[in-house]
Amino acid sequence: MPSNFALKAMNAAHRALLKASFGKLGNEVGGMPSLELTTTGRKSGRPHAVMLTAPVVDGDTYVVVASRGGDPVHPAWFLNLRDNSDVVVSVQSGPRVPMTAQVATAEKRASLWPRVVEAQPVYADYQTKTTREIPLVLLTPKN
């Protein structure tokens, strides 16, 4: 499982690549659009941003995977949005858009998981590394 340091380093490297290339590199990773998700810290109340990918995109809904590389604990960003579903998302270095985050229900996850794994088989490997069910989160623009 990746350490907190490794995860933060990967996020910093991704941001640096986007900045150095003026958004020309890093907007897509492994065939998936990258996005910056900003949540509100459940303890601090401060904004926290993380770079993620969306293996499934349905219209204006982006599906992100709270895998943390198959770690036995949920990523902090997931815990934040579980407590406060108001988030801000920038897709492929685009404008920051207020969105709502919704953890997929068991039924919705069952229909989405095969699509996630088809888009990125590594997620199936992550699921085998942990006993927790890896959550899927749907990000949709606020109306």
Image: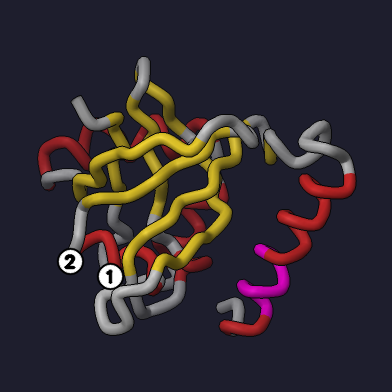
Quadrant where the N terminus is found in the figure: bottom right
Circle on res. 83: 2
Q: Position of residue 110 (x, y in %)?
A: 21, 39
What residue is drawn where x is 80% and y is 57%?
A: 16
State the CA–CA distance, disc 2 to disc 1. Answer: 6 Å
Q: Which residues are magenta?
A: 6-11
In the rendered image, which residue does mark 1 sit on?
Answer: 79
The residue lying at 60 percent from left, 77 percent from top is: 2
Q: Main secondary structure of the magenta part?
A: helix
Tell me which amino acid carries mark 2.
Answer: Asp
Q: Amino acid under label 1?
A: Leu
Residue 73 vs residue 20, the one in the foreground: 20
Position of 114 relative to 60 (above/below):
below
Crowding at label 2, few (<14), some or many (≥20) Cα neighbours within 10 Å? few
Give the image location of residue 78, x and y in percent.
32, 64
Which quadrant of the rendered structure holds the C terminus?
top left
Q: Nearer the viewer, residue 91 or 1?
A: 91
Q: Does residue 9 show up magenta in the picture? A: yes
- Report if residue 4 lies within the magenta region: no
The residue positioned farthest toward the top in the image shown = 59
- Identify the residue at horizontal 12%, vertical 45% (top origin): 105
Q: Which image quadrant for residue 107?
A: top left
Give residue 21's position: percent from left, percent from top: 88, 40
Q: Secondary structure at mark 2?
A: helix
